[in-house]
Image (cartoon, rainbow, N blue to C red):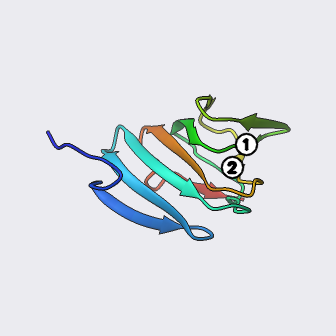
């Protein structure tokens, strides 16, 4: 067992438009990460064939587009995205947004960009 935190993750990575991520669990069957998106950043539309995901907002407000719906999530709110659903997250605010992202199974090699 390994104690993990944002300061001591299994791995730190950067993605998209200056966003950061910290791996806490990275196994084939489960991935848990904390991510930070800067103000004005957005992710590319995509989906996962196998992985379902759960996003939980720690700080800020995030906008999720999923299929034909838009969800605004505030701090301490979460959203479950089923496998196969086209989606993306955006930070339309003027401050960073931080969230926990759980994927089951891991999204490694299971992301189809649109």
- Mark 1 Cα-neighbour bin, 10 Å: few <14, some 14–19, many ≥20: many
Q: Quadrant of residue 11?
A: bottom left
Residue 73 on image: x %, y %: 70, 35
Kindly identify the residue that appears in the image at 33 percent across and 46 percent down.
Answer: 24
Which residue corresponds to mark 2? 89
Residue 15 on image: x %, y %: 53, 66
Kindly identify the residue that appears in the image at 39 percent across and 55 percent down.
Answer: 22
Total labels: the figure holds: 2
Residue extending farthest front: 95
Q: Which residue is at the front of the view, 9 or 39? A: 39
Kindly identify the residue that appears in the image at 31 percent across and 56 percent down.
Answer: 7
Residue 74 on image: x %, y %: 68, 35
Q: Are marks 2 and 1 in contact (CB under 8 Å)?
A: yes
Which residue corresponds to mark 1? 64
Is residue 53 toward the left or the right of residue 109 in the image?
Answer: right
Q: Secondary structure at mark 2?
A: strand
Residue extending farthest bottom: 18
């Amino acid at each position: 067992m390994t104690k993990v935190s944002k300061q001591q993750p299994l791995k730190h990575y950067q993605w998209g438009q200056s966003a950061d991520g910290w791996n806490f669990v990275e196994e084939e069957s489960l991935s848990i990460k904390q991510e930070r998106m800067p103000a004005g950043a957005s992710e590319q539309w995509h989906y996962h064939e196998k992985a379902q995901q759960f996003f939980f907002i720690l700080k800020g407000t995030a906008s999720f587009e999923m299929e034909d719906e838009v969800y605004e999530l505030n701090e301490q709110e979460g959203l479950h995205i089923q496998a196969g659903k086209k989606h993306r997250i955006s930070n339309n605010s003027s401050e960073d947004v931080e969230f926990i992202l759980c994927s089951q199974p891991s999204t490694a090699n299971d992301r189809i960009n649109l």
